[in-house]
Amino acid sequence: MLPTLPERYHLLDAIRGFVILNVVVFHFLFDIYVLYEKNPAWTAAPAIDMWRQTVCWIFIFLSGFVWRWGRHSSWKRGLMLNLWGLLITLISWLLFPAHIIRFGILNFMGTAILLMIGLHKILDKIPPLIGMLSSVIAYSVCNSITRNLFSLNNIIDVPIPVWFYQWPIMAPLGFPPPNFTSADYFPLLPWIFIYFLGYFAHMPLTRNTAWTKIFMQQIPILSPLGTHTLLVYLIHQPLCLLLVSAIIPCLY
């Protein structure tokens, strides 16, 4: 939960509102290009992949940033997001089995929230700047584990034993088996380190008077939208599919 008005940090809401708008546009185009096979390789384009990655970085960073404010409802929020994530997995399996979503963004977020219940006291012992730097390095090192490597900017590569990738239960950790597929995959490694980065950034930024004044600025439309990101996320894909199914005949 964010601070109550008038101390609410409206700019953070606005950023989340901007991010969820990007998610809606991305999935609308995804439905056209991938689900309706207008250009199945669309997501492989470097610019599209960077767009998707940037949106994910911002959203996960912000979620880690605001964890402290919702600490007392962490069990409820974490379990709720995991249940919504499992429901999305079921629906995607029934409707689009070729594009099933397994351990997507909601399952990651729910699991990260729950993990923080046990980790926050440990993380609080680390100076924020050191924590932020360590998180960036750890994310970089773990960003290649789906390629069976711990890699530091492709300079130092450490192979990961193959047996890590033999069981489906390891996929949420970041070690998917060879036959694993997911249209929206956010394993704990490396993404938990972006969450930690947001968590560590919270203290120095919210204690800085200049930054808190900036955070309190409202942006019309985006700030209110950012307070309903979960609702928008849950309903946007069905609406996008309806819209795409209505306009797709015009694209042939």
Image (spheres, rainbow, N blue to C red):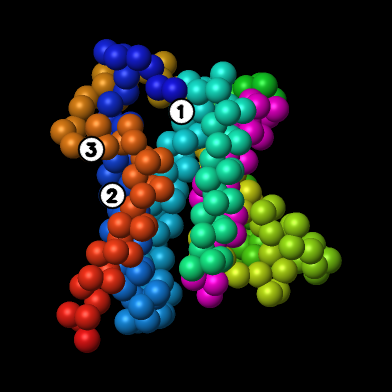
Q: Earlier in the sequence, mark 2 or mark 1?
A: 2
166 inside magenta stretch: no
Distance, label 2 to label 3, CA atoms, is: 9 Å
The answer to whether mark 1 and mark 3 are in CB contact below 8 A is no
What secondary structure is the stretch in magenta mostly built from? helix
Q: Earlier in the sequence, mark 2 or mark 3?
A: 2
In front here: 67 or 183? 183
In front here: 251 or 55? 251
Q: Which residue is mark 2?
A: 21
Q: Residue at x 41, y 66 (%)?
A: 49
Q: Secondary structure at mark 1?
A: loop
Residue 222, label in figure: 3
Q: Residue at x 58, y 51 (%)?
A: 86
Q: Locate residue 3 relative to residue 80 in the image: left or right.
A: left
Residue 66, label in figure: 1
Q: Position of residue 24 (x, y in %)?
A: 31, 55
Screen quadrant of the C terminus: bottom left
The image shows residue 244, relative to residue 109, as above or below, that is below
Category of crowding for the residue at label 3, using alpha-carbon neighbours closer than 10 angstroms: few (below 14), some (14–19), many (at least 20): many
Determine the image quadrant of residue 205: top left
Q: Amino acid at mark 1?
A: Val
Q: Position of residue 195 (x, y in %)?
A: 53, 39
113 inside magenta stretch: yes
In front here: 161 or 28? 28
Q: Position of residue 117 (x, y in %)?
A: 65, 27
Determine the image quadrant of residue 210: top left
Q: Amino acid at mark 2?
A: Leu
Q: Locate residue 5 relative to residue 54 in the image: left or right.
A: left
